[in-house]
Image: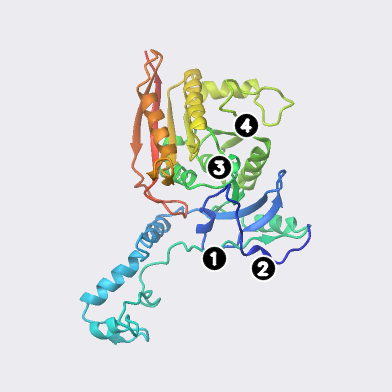
Amino acid sequence: MDVVGTETMDEITFRSDTVLSDVHLNTPNKRHLMVRLNNVGQPVFLTNFKLLWNKNAREDSRDNEKLEIKPSGLVQADREFLSKANCDSDFLDENGTRASPRRGMEALLDEDGDLEVVRRPQSFSDLKQGPSRDKVHPIILTQGAENLIEEEEQESLHHDFVKIEHTMATPLEDAGKQVWRGAFLLADYILFKSDLFKNCTVLELGAGTGITSIIAGTVAKTVYCTDVGEDLLVMCERNVTLNKHLTEEKGGTIKVRELDWLKDGLCTDPQVPYSWSEEEIADLHDHTTVVFAADVFYDDDLTDALFKTLYRITHNLKNPCTIYLSIEKRLNFTLRHLDITCEAYDHFRFSLNDLENLKDGKMKFTVEPIEATFPQFLVYERIEQLELWKIIAEPLT
């Protein structure tokens, strides 16, 4: 690969038919390393996502949420600062000295008397700055630079980061190669409720880059990490290998396998990459008690196929199981309705309702939402549109 100056990569332009997740944009002060081109010529980047294992770190994450940008364009901390300037007897001016409220407010006005919003001085702040919206600055590696990555991995085999190879902008059909917020929400819940998943056999549907399965692998006994498409599964398996230091000492096993929602059975042809063995299928049916899918509800036909897959799999399981589904409610303006709609989310909720009301005399599905009030273990924007749902699937006796 020829050396390309980073200046040419500082600005990325996207075609109108591409989709872009903003998860990787929310890693402050990080450059995203372009490590290779995949089989279809898409740039693949490596990002280290920090894990917040301890209580203080999780509280820092909640502090970061206080700095979320509001629709008016003001940061909440700025509002608190301006309010404090109005009611306190004095405060620090731009030189760090005490100033009266009147003098302080005058400093916030421009020549025409308009309010000029300023950031709270760094020395005054008792809050940490939240995730920034920095531009992405990919770096193209030269040939042979892969060794640098290997050396870096050997030096940083610790438990503070999960390393994920991913793309940044893809056609909709390749959206699984990106990292999405719903995967982080579900990963947070797995870490928060780790006792629920300890020593379990878990099946993930539509795993994409595999980040949620990797987190599950730190507590579960076996994780079947599934998706469709050899190129995507290769990326997923690379990510599992990159993070084996997180799962191996826990004794967890992650198996990357193909599971096509549009097909009734599991592929057992040994000549097909990522096919299933008969022993694995038996283990899946005999021991699986947890199924989850993260942020895969963006196309109505695929949503229908997923719910049919859930129905088929749960009927084949020996034990009752719990299904966890995360989704981001995405709002779009449509010309058809001339209004803000969320059609993919609406279709998901209709499908969820149909599953709960299903009466086939064999299975009972109980659906309930999970409030997203549990702490964050990964740094991302937990927006109010993120939802987590739990479905208990149990046979009728």
| Alpha carbon distance from label 3 to label 4 | 14 Å
Dot 4 or dot 2, earlier in sequence: 2
Residues packed near mark 4 inside 10 Å, few (<14), some (14 to 19) or many (20 plus): many
Q: Where is residue 158 in the image (x, y as percent from the top left)?
A: 58, 54
For the residues bearing labels 2 and 3, Cβ distance under 8 angstroms:
no
Dot 1 or dot 3, earlier in sequence: 1
| Alpha carbon distance from label 4 to label 1 | 35 Å
What kind of residue is marked 3?
Answer: Ile
What secondary structure is marked by label 2? Answer: helix
| Alpha carbon distance from label 1 to label 3 | 25 Å
Q: Position of residue 91 (x, y in %)?
A: 28, 81
Q: In which quarter of the image is the N terminus?
A: bottom right
State whether residue 38 appears in this view. yes
**Measured along the vertical axis of the image, is residue 334 above or below residue 60?**
above
Disc number placed over residue 29 in the picture, else none: 1
Q: Which of 10 and 265 is in front in this view?
A: 10
Identity of the residue drawn at 51% across and 53% down: 23
What secondary structure is marked by label 4? Answer: strand
Disc number placed over residue 257 in the picture, else none: 4
